[in-house]
Image (cartoon, grey):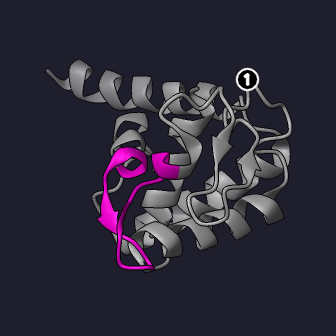
Amino acid sequence: MKRTLIIIPMILLLASALFAKDFNPDMQNYIQQLKTQARNQNSSFSDFDIKRGEEIFTSVHMGKRGENISCTSCHNINLSQNGKNHFTNKTIKPLSPSANPDRLVDVKEVKKWLKRNFKDVYNRVGTAQEKGDVLYYINSK
């Protein structure tokens, strides 16, 4: 029993470290900052989660203009395809880093768009955990 209690957290930590390798060093640093913030906001936080990120990304909310909207309203459910801005009709290049290598590389850009898009969809700034979950989800596509 004691072995299991030691092995499970080690496996989770290793899986987290392996996944974080997909991010460049600047993004890995940002992810670590988000983890620290998430732990400070929620003592039971253990790691970001792709499934939670998918739920955040695909769930529909009353957006900033009083209409139902989700992240997929602009970025589509398939992040490897172009999207279209719900408000301006401008084309958005694929959000998936595998389809668009320019995604999730510039921390300043990532912070800007997370802040803006959370405000558009959720009418608020996202929490550190929500941001990390969404970044893990996007990075998995």
Left or right position of 56 against 112: left
**Residue 97 horizontal side relative to residue 2, left or right:** right
In the depicted structure, whether residue 16 falls above or below residue 39: above
Seen in the image, is 111 located left or right of residue 3? right
Q: In the image, residue 95 lies at what x, y percent? A: 67, 39
Query: Few, some or many C-alpha atoms within 10 Å of disc 1 (few <14, some 14-19, many ≥20)?
Result: some
- Which residue is rendered at x = 23% and y = 29% of the image? 5
Residue 7, image quadrant: top left
Relative to 30, say whether 67 is above or below: below
Q: Tag 1's secondary structure?
A: loop
Image quadrant in which you'd find residue 113: bottom right
Identified at 25% across, 19% down, the residue is: 3
Residue 71 falls inside the magenta stretch: yes
Q: What is the number of callouts on the image?
A: 1
User: 68 above or below 75?
Assistant: below
Where does label 1 land, which residue? 98
Residue type, numbered disc 1: Ser
Q: Quadrant of the C terminus?
A: top right
Residue 47 at what x, y percent from top left? Answer: 43, 45
x then y, percent, for residue 98: 73, 23
Foreground residue, 28 or 90? 90
Of residues 125 and 123, the one drawn nearer to the viewer in this rendering:
123
- Provide the residue span drawn in magenta: 56-73
Determine the residue positioned at 63% across, 56% down: 85
Magenta run includes residue 104? no
Q: Residue furthest left?
A: 1
Q: 87 and 124: which one is in front?
A: 87
Residue at screen point 48% across, 50% down: 73
Residue 65 at what x, y percent from top left? 44, 79
